[in-house]
Image (cartoon, helix red, strand yellow):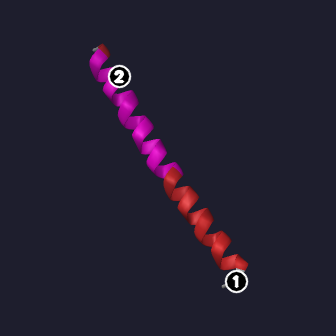
Amino acid sequence: MRPNGTSAVLANHRRDHEIEAGRARKKISDAKKYLIH
């Protein structure tokens, strides 16, 4: 395996994780807004 390919996969995975984390944060903030109102 080439190191380039591995780092590319890791970068991809990290970005996917960040996207998922962002969605989770948005859901939590939406839930808080809903509970407040």
In the rendered view, tell whether residue 37 sits above or below residue 18: above
Residue highlighted by disc 1: 2
In the rendered view, tell whether residue 36 sits above or below residue 3: above
Q: Quadrant of residue 27?
A: top left
Which portion, as a residue range, is magenta? 18-35
Q: Residue type at mark 1? A: Arg
Residue highlighted by disc 2: 32
Instruction: Classify mark 2: residues with Cα within 10 Å, few (<14), some (14-19) or many (20+).
Output: few
Name the mark on residue 20: none
Q: Residue type at mark 2? A: Lys
In the rendered view, tell whether residue 19 sits above or below residue 30: below
In the rendered view, tell whether residue 24 sits above or below residue 9: above
Describe the element under mark 2 as helix, strand or loop: helix
Dominant secondary structure (helix, strand or loop) of the stretch shown in magenta: helix
Describe the element under mark 1 as helix, strand or loop: loop
Q: Out of 9 and 36, give the one closest to the viewer.
A: 9
Foreground mark, 2 or 1, reads 1
In the image, taking residue 19 as reference, residue 30 lies left or right, namely left
Image quadrant holding the N terminus, namely bottom right
Residue depicted at 27% across the width and 14% down the height: 37
Residue depicted at 31% across the width and 27% down the height: 31
